[in-house]
Image (tube, rainbow, N blue to C red):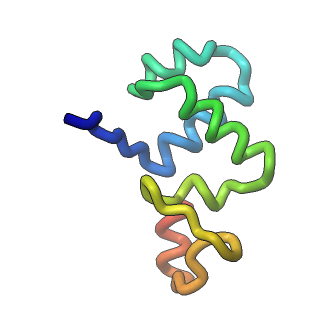
Amino acid sequence: MGKKKNYYSETVKRQVIELKLEGKLTNREIMEKLGICNVGQIKTWMKWFRNGEEHRLAQPIGKQYSYGKGPADLTEIEELKRTN
């Protein structure tokens, strides 16, 4: 039987990045505070942030866009909902 994949919202991912940038909490403390199960997630999200790949924070599990910067067909309203 396979593991259940955890889904973390874009909001949680951005909170992790903000907490890391503040530098007041360790990875373990961030994991406990936000319910993150694996430190690798934090490292991946920080890598995406440092590399300017923030569009990847909005991607669902297992869905990596191969061209461009993500879904190009989002309306302005959908884009605003995604970023807020």
Depth check, front residue: 72 or 1: 1
Residue sitting farthest toward the right: 51
Residue at the image point whose x is 45% and y is 56% from the top? 62
Counting from the top left corner in percent of width and height, residue 76 is at 56, 83
Q: Is residue 79 above or below residue 34?
A: below
Depth check, front residue: 49 or 63: 63
Can residue 84 be spotted in the picture?
no
Q: Is residue 66 above or below residue 17?
A: below
Can residue 73 be spotted in the picture?
yes
Counting from the top left corner in percent of width and height, residue 37 is at 41, 25
Residue at the image point whose x is 59% and y is 31% from the top? 42
Q: Is residue 6 above or below residue 42?
A: below
Q: Is residue 51 above or below residue 82?
A: above
Residue sitting farthest toward the front: 1
* Side of 22 relative to 42 (left or right): right
Residue at the image point whose x is 64% and y is 61% from the top? 55
Residue at the image point whose x is 50% and y is 51% from the top? 10
* Side of 82 relative to 52 (left or right): left
Placement of the N terminus among the 4 image quadrants: top left
Counting from the top left corner in percent of width and height, residue 51 is at 80, 49
Counting from the top left corner in percent of width and height, residue 66 is at 63, 70
When asked about the image quadrant of residue 68, the answer is: bottom right
Q: How many marks?
A: 0
* Side of 47 relative to 4 (left or right): right
